[in-house]
Image: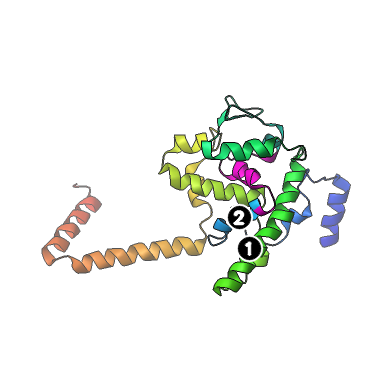
Amino acid sequence: MGETGTKYYQRSGRRSQPGRSDKDRRSGLKDIPGIAQPLLMKAAAKIGHEALVVLLVTYYLRPYEICTALFANGQLIVQGFGQPVVIAEKHRELIDEWMKRSFRPQKPATIHNILSGRLRRALIEELECLEEEQHIALPWRNEVRCGVRELRRLAEERFAVAVNGDEAVFRELCHSYEASLAQTVYWRLTALSRQCIANAFVYEVEEIRALMDADSRAAIERFAKGLDNGSV
C-alpha cells in the first residue's frame, strides 16, 4: 500500500508550495504553549526579527503580504487590501526600521525558513534557560514550533478574546469577511475537552441544587415539567 501511494504521487507530479516542504508536516506541537508565548518576542528580538513576528501576529499578515507591503505615514499599504493597515504608534519605529533593511525577506519562503529555523532555535534556547533558572520541567521544548500556522493560531486566539464576541471586529482584525469567530473558538476542542466542560457543568448544577431550599427546587421542577408538557 505504501509503495502504491508513493508511485501515485510520483506520477501525479505533485509539487510542494514555496516554503511548504515536507518539514512542515513533521511531528511537533500544534500550538505555542502559554508558557512559551511571552518568550516568543524575546526570541524574535534576539535574532533581529521582532517586527516580523509583530506583523504576523498583531496585524495578521501573511508572508507574501509582508514581502510586498509598503510602510508610509504610520500605515502599511498591502497589496490586495482595500485600505491601508493602521500601525499602532508603539510599533511604527520598529516596523519602519525593519522594512527599510536592504536584506529583509523578499520572498515568502524566506520568512518560512526564518520562523522554522532561527526563530525556533532561539525560542528553544529561551525555554532551556527558563528550565535551568527556574527549575521548570519543559520536556516538550524541542517539539515547539513557531511557523506561520502556529503564529496565526496564536493571533486568532488573542483576537477571539479581545473582541469579546464581536464577530464584525474579529473579521476586521483578520482582514476577511469570511472569518468565523465561532470556528476559531471551538474547532480546537478535543473530545476530552468537551467532556470535561460537560462534566464541569453537571457538577456546578449539582452544587447549586445542594444550596437551594426545598421550595425553590420544587418550583424549578414544576417549571421544567411545564416546559416538557408545553404548558409554559
Label 1 amino acid?
Glu
List the residue tagged with mark 1. Answer: 126
First along the sequence among labels 2 and 1:
2
Whole-percent x, y for residue 153 in the image = 57, 49
Label 2 neighbour load within 10 Å: few <14, some 14-19, many 20+: some
Query: For this rendering, which residue is in front, 95 or 17?
Result: 95
Q: Secondary structure at mark 1?
A: helix
Magenta part of the chain = 46-63
Q: Is residue 168 visible?
A: yes
Category of crowding for the residue at label 1, using alpha-carbon neighbours closer than 10 angstroms: few (below 14), some (14–19), many (at least 20)? some
Spatial distance from mark 2 to mark 1, Cα to Cα?
8 Å
Q: Amino acid at mark 2?
A: Lys
Query: Does 94 sit above or below residue 216?
Result: above
Q: Is mark 2 in CB contact (under 8 Å) with mark 1?
A: yes
Residue 138 visible in the shown view:
no
Location of residue 126 in the rendering, given as x and y in whole percent from the top left corner: 63, 63
Magenta-span inclusion, residue 178: no
Residue 72, given in percent of the width and then of the height, sits at: 62, 27
